[in-house]
Amino acid sequence: MLNLFALTEDPTNRRVRFSLSQEVQTDLTTLLTQQEADFADNGQEEIQFDGKYKPDLGEILVINGFDDIDDLADAVANPLSIPEVQPSPDTFDTIKALFSGHVDAGGIVTVLVQYFDKKRVISTNGLSIFHSSNVYKKIEGIGLTIDSKITATIRDGALKFHSFHLLRQIFDMSAYYKEATDGDIHDFATLPCLGISNVSTLVANSDNWVRRKLWLISQSQILTKVPVCDIKAVAAEFSIPLETEHSDGVEKIKIPEAKRDLKTLLRFLDEDYYKSPLLQNRYITNSKRPV
């Protein structure tokens, strides 16, 4: 039988346990067992996470050596050591995720994690009712609804997931997903092939998407490996606006100050544009996986 836990934002009670009736625990076990099977069916091909690729149906992203810093596996293996959740609106408002899991015969723990949308809290404010035996009855006390699918699993150090967007709302993924810091942006601005009139404007325009692109472009070293003349020629082929300027006899790529133009250029420099090999059609992709 599976137990149900919550991962919270409360540093003094990061893991709490729900005390379930036998009937609810039986239903929960059936529900999550099916969800785990569905999760596995939709992730038969494992792809190592690099921040560039969004999985298609049947694919799943994997981070090996994931640090289970909150020790969710220990909670699954030793449920009675985890304090019970306090049934109050303040406590429920701190829930980041629900989790459960099981231990196999070899002692390996599988953790099943669900992102928790606070809209799923059944509040004591107002009047909450449910339909039963042909009538609507009042819900006594605070409650919640369980989601219809699993967000991630953790087993033997491997974190598997489909949506990084949901995952980063549960765990601190900064060690696995890099974005350029203000210092990185200032370093980027010193590249000899770039012409940046106002670094402060670039920093101000750098939302999470821009910072991610700047970090990826810096890591690829495309601006030091490919001459500006070649970059300009390919940009013209794809009708990408790219202006250059000459300074001290060196041709430099002008970094636009307008955020929309900046994102178009960064998408190009991160090679999100490609040409189909047969029909030579031009496309934009938001997901790249090396062949």
Image: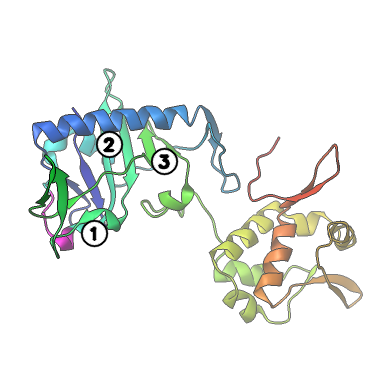
Q: Tell me how far mark 2 sits from mark 3, CA to CA.
A: 12 Å
- In the picture, the disc for residue 66 is 3
> In the picture shown, does residue 255 fall above or below 75?
below
In front of the other: 137 or 194 = 137
**87 is within the stretch colored magenta:** yes
Task: Please state the horizontal and vertical placement of residue 21, each as a whole percent of the image.
Answer: 9, 36
Q: Tell me how far mark 2 sits from mark 1, CA to CA.
A: 20 Å
Contact flag, marks 3 and 1 (Cβ < 8 Å): no
Give the amino acid at mark 3. Phe
> In the picture shown, does residue 104 fall above or below 125?
above
- In the picture, the disc for residue 238 is none
Which of discs 2 and 1 lies nearer the camera? The answer is 1
Residue at horizontal 78 percent and vertical 58 percent from the top: 224
Residue 189 seen in the current view: no
| Mark found first going from the N terminus, 3 or 1 | 3
Question: Which span of residues is magenta-colored?
Answer: 85-91
Element under label 2?
helix
**Residue holding disc 1:** 94
Residue at horizontal 10 percent and vertical 41 percent from the top: 19
